[in-house]
Amino acid sequence: MNTMGLNLIFQMGCLCSKEAVYVKSDKYYIVEKIGEGGFSTVSLIEHSQTKKRYALKKIICHGREDQAQAIREVEHHKTFVHPNILPLLDHALTGCADPVLNSTSQVLMVLPYYPKGTLANDLELRSVGKHYMSSVDILKMFLKICEAVKVFHDAKPIAYAHRDLKTANVLLANDNNPLLMDLGSVAPAVVKVCGSAEAQNLQDVAAERCSMPYRAPELFHVDSYCVVDQRTDVWSLGCLLYAMCYFKSPFDTVYERGDSVALAVISGNITFPENTPFPQELHDLILFMLKVTPSERPFIHSVCDNAQDLLSRLSNREEPNV
């Protein structure tokens, strides 16, 4: 082979040198790693025959509880199906999680790949030039996210909560259709806490699985005797809607400074930029969700109704320059 041919192989890469992964009978090549969390990695993969590209979520399980949690995530994908919830295309469990034998298992999940990335990615790009979305576009997207959340909250026989709603967990299709992802934090919505041990356990789980700038106040300091319900998600939706307007959660700056997010959240002091392209009604909708006292916070159906009503009113108005 001549030098030019060798150079082409080095530049293009050789498929035989790429790491292969099998999900049941399908073989994929790993193209690149595109994400990493505390419990999993996400890679861009290519089917060996069709050449179609997908996302592969790999969860390493070190014990039986880890494995059970990962399998629950798979089951949640099967249970909660909606055009605005990321679908699971295939999955596999390999190995055996046993800390005594120092062995691990892997749960592999094949998911659709969206090159545009997450809402967080989009907002970060927009923030550079203060490229605001219009109020109407924000509300249209927000309502679709709320419809996805409603699927969890309306589940029978028991309601579920997502518990980690944030801009980084919303994927965007090419047409900007939002898809809620990462169902690893999904759990029964209503939790009756009876005693300090149960309170500490819920608080620890929330600290592990719920992102701080979007976490509801009642999950920072869980009372020894209380009931926590699906309105933890409504708080997160308020933070998410704020971020859709102003690129970040109202508590992201506190987090980035290293100050106490818990104190900031529990204080409930929400401020908006003085120079804003958005109407007061949109701020009111955000504040409607960001009630520190859970019992004063609305349920998802009221959020949808208010957001739809505001969208209808703003659609009939002339949009401000954004």
Image: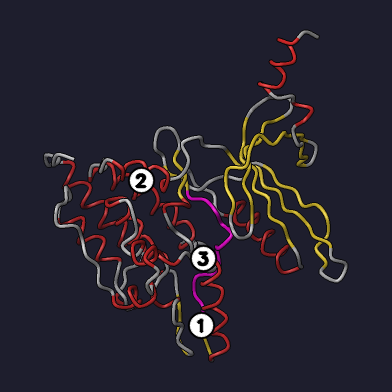
**Do the residues under discs 3 and 2 have CB atoms within 8 angstroms?**
no
The image position of residue 124, as x and y in percent, is 37, 46
Q: Secondary structure at mark 3?
A: strand
Residue 65 point in image, percent of width and height: 72, 69
Amino acid type of the residue that numbered disc 3 sits on in the rendered structure? Tyr
Residue 66 placement, left or right of 220 = right
**Residue indicated by mark 1:** 192
The tally of labels here is 3
The range drawn in magenta is 180-191
Q: CA distance from mark 1 to mark 2?
A: 37 Å
Q: Residue 151's x, y, as percent?
A: 47, 56
Colour approach in the figure = secondary structure
Dot 2 lies on which element? helix
Quarter containing the N terminus: top right
Mark 1 or 2: in front is: 2
Q: Nearer the viewer, mark 3 or mark 2?
A: 2
